[in-house]
């Protein structure tokens, strides 16, 4: 059996794993949080308006005014997640009256070196060898 030698750099493995970050905040705060997340290198973001499914009496009991929300989908690097979650927790308290939800889901793959470079905000990949 032939022995396989590694070159030390596997071109099929990205240096930083990408995550889909979902952030849910009060409607009207979506632009603020989207701009805030962009400061962490989130080059691709989509902000949608959502409506909660809680019944009116539960919304009133919890002291919420309405069930309208902004849902922000952002692509971020995994190595940035801890800093993003800490900063979001602080912003939820100061800007969003202590409410907001954020969680991340790993992306299993991205097709193309340039796409990965853009999504990971890694200029070395974008400016690298284009051949």
Image: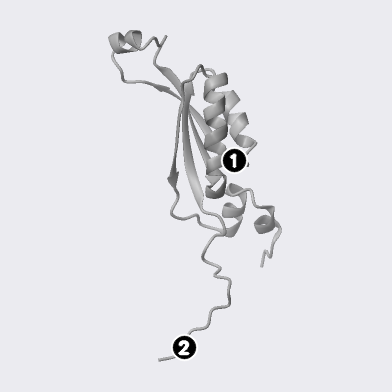
* Residue 41 percent location from the top left of the image: 63, 42
Residue for point 59% across, 40% down: 42
Residue for point 53% across, 17% down: 28
Of residues 117 and 61, the one nearer the viewer is 61
Extreme residue in the bottom direction: 1
Q: Residues within 10 Å of mark 1 (few under 14, many from 20)?
A: many
* Residue 129 percent location from the top left of the image: 68, 65
User: Residue 91: which quarter of the image?
Assistant: top right
Q: Is residue 47 left or right of residue 52?
A: right
Q: Is residue 55 above or below residue 46?
A: above
Q: Quadrant of the N terminus?
A: bottom left
* Residue 100 percent location from the top left of the image: 46, 25
Q: Residues within 10 Å of mark 2 (few under 14, many from 20)?
A: few
Comes first in the chain, label 1 or label 2: 2
Mark 2, residue position: 3
Residue 42 in view of the camera: yes
Q: Is residue 33 left or right of residue 127?
A: left
Residue for point 34% across, 8% down: 60
For label 1, the SS is loop
Which mark lies nearer to you, 1 or 2?
Answer: 2
* Number of the label disc, if any, that sits on residue 42: 1
């Amino acid at each position: 059996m032939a022995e396989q030698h590694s070159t030390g750099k596997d071109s099929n493995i990205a240096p930083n794993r990408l995550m889909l970050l979902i952030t849910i905040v009060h409607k009207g705060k979506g632009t603020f949080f989207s701009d805030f997340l962009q400061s962490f290198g989130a080059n691709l973001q989509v902000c949608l308006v959502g409506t909660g499914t809680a019944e009116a009496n539960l919304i009133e009991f919890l002291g919420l005014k309405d069930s309208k929300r902004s849902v922000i989908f952002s692509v971020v690097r995994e190595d940035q997640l801890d800093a993003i979650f800490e900063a979001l927790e602080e912003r939820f308290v100061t800007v969003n009256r202590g409410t907001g939800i954020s969680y991340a889901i790993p992306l299993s793959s991205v097709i193309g070196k340039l796409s990965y470079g853009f999504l990971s905000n890694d200029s070395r990949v974008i400016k690298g060898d284009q051949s």
